[in-house]
Image (spheres, rainbow, N blue to C red):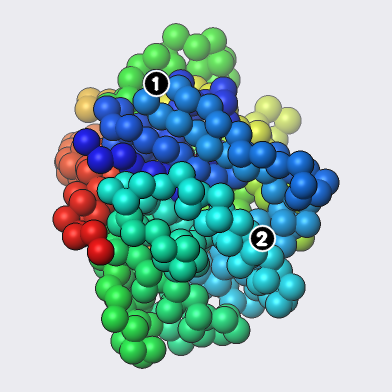
Amino acid sequence: MQRLVIVSNRVPAIRDRKQPAGGLAVALRDAIRDRPTLWFGWSGQQVADCADRPLGMDTVGHVTYATIALTHKEYNGFYQGYSNAVLWPLCHYRAGLMNYNRHDQQIYINVNTLFANRLAPLLESDDMVWVHDYHLFPLGRILRGLKVKARIGFFLHIPFPPWSLMRSLPAAAALMRALRAYDVIGVQTEDDARNMNEAFAVLGIPARARVFPIGIDPDSFATCAREGQGLPQLRRLQQDLRGMPLIIGVDRMDYSKGLPERLRGYDTFLKRYPEYRGKVVYLQITPVSRGSVPEYQSLRAELDQLVGHINGTYGAFDWTPVRYLTHPLPRELLAAFFQLSSAVLVTPLRDGMNLVAKEYVAAQLADNPGVLILSRFAGAAADMDDALQVNPHDSDEIATALHKALSMSASERKVRWERLRTDVWRVTAASWARSFIAALSEVRTA
Ligand code: ADQ
């Protein structure tokens, strides 16, 4: 069996290697289960200068992890700067939030070059190299420059905007041309593929993006929900609710997730439907992420203000309308909370896919499923017609959807959930990885 080489910005931390806790490691679990694999990327460590950074090598079963540290300067320019403060906002259609400068762009290229230089000697010609995400757009092109003959594929986990927007990035054309080095280019949705292919066409680049929608491992998430039933925190929340329906939201703290818009929607809901005051609880679980990027700091301040405003306006001495946490919870507990809740709010302004929507569906029980309220602008919306789809910018639409969800008959909830469930079990993490790897293995080596 050919070796799979995964390249991603972060390689799973040592503690997560035996039992991956989430993200890419879970998504790829099936693909790497019985296949010799090399996983290359940043170790998560920062060092003062570039002299003292040997490649870390560590093998667990048939997976070898090869990791490298970044200097503080590289971390700031490549990761915080160009990746998270330029490419991330731009790909989420937020050009106005870009914090572009040529210096960070150069460091981005330098780190991609560093990755390529350290990875190339480890590669063999019949390897299948699978590069992940926006941190590594130019990696394939640099590897080709180093005469790497192996097949190389690229998957973009986040959206790809129309060329008319993408071209506001000063080096957009070069970035698009770099993609040509890949044998397979994968994106999440038809919209993303259309946008990317339009950019290729405008620039006369002979490359083609294809759609490989990502999913979750629904069986294991359903198991998490079952295992979570025994947790004391679940019982405490249940007692606390005193029979009130629970609305839940679970997202990294990111401006793409539409959190202020969602809170405004809930505010409108309590204003328009006063009968729910004192009769419903909204629990928002939002671990802080990228906390040193300024836009994320101002988001946090805005959320603090909105939560305080809602609780101050509608709260009573014995009722808090919004419960708000900024730390992550164990997956079993999250899954159990999903199962307990009557509705989930997944309202990103843009999202590549959004796995929370799929996890929510996987955690429900057939006899009393909760309702998925989902933004039209999440990649997941493409296949989830039976969710209550909303435009997150319209707080009235969120309010109406909340009312509809909380008053929906059990039979309608079941019909909708059955159909959503079929999709979540059809397009999984395993099927995503399988189809991408199959596409890559069909490519003939040079
Ligand atoms: P993310 O932007 O991180 O992923 P998402 O797809 O929703 O977004 O995945 C988040 C994961 O983190 C989920 O598995 C969720 O359960 C977990 N998580 C979130 N909040 C948590 C909390 N409070 N406690 C514990 N776990 C929590 C990027 C893209 C997405 C794309 C994925 C995969 O932005 O659009 O779907 O990659 O390709």
Nearest the eye: 33 or 366: 33
Query: Disc 1, ligand 1: is the CB inside 8 Å?
Result: no
Q: Distance between the Cα atoms at labels 2 and 1?
A: 32 Å
Query: Is residue 95 visible in the rendered structure shown here?
Result: yes
Nearest the eye: 415 or 3: 3
Residue 61, which numbered label?
A: 1
Residue 97, which numbered label?
A: none
Q: Amino acid at mark 2?
A: Phe
Secondary structure category for the residue under label 2:
helix
- Residues packed near mark 2 inside 10 Å, few (<14), some (14 to 19) or many (20 plus): many
Secondary structure category for the residue under label 1:
loop
- Vertically, is 308 above or below 339? below
- Vertically, is 232 above or below 372? above
Q: Residue at x 76, y 41 (%)?
A: 52
Residue 413: image location, x then y, percent: 25, 39
Residue 278 appears left or right of 7: right
Residue 444 falls in image quadrant: bottom left
Badge 2 is on which residue?
A: 78
Q: Is the Cβ of the residue at disc 2 closer than 8 Å to that at disc 1?
A: no
- Residues packed near mark 1 inside 10 Å, few (<14), some (14 to 19) or many (20 plus): few
Query: Is residue 239 visible in the rendered structure shown here?
Result: no
From the image, state whether disc 2 or disc 1 is nearer to you: 1
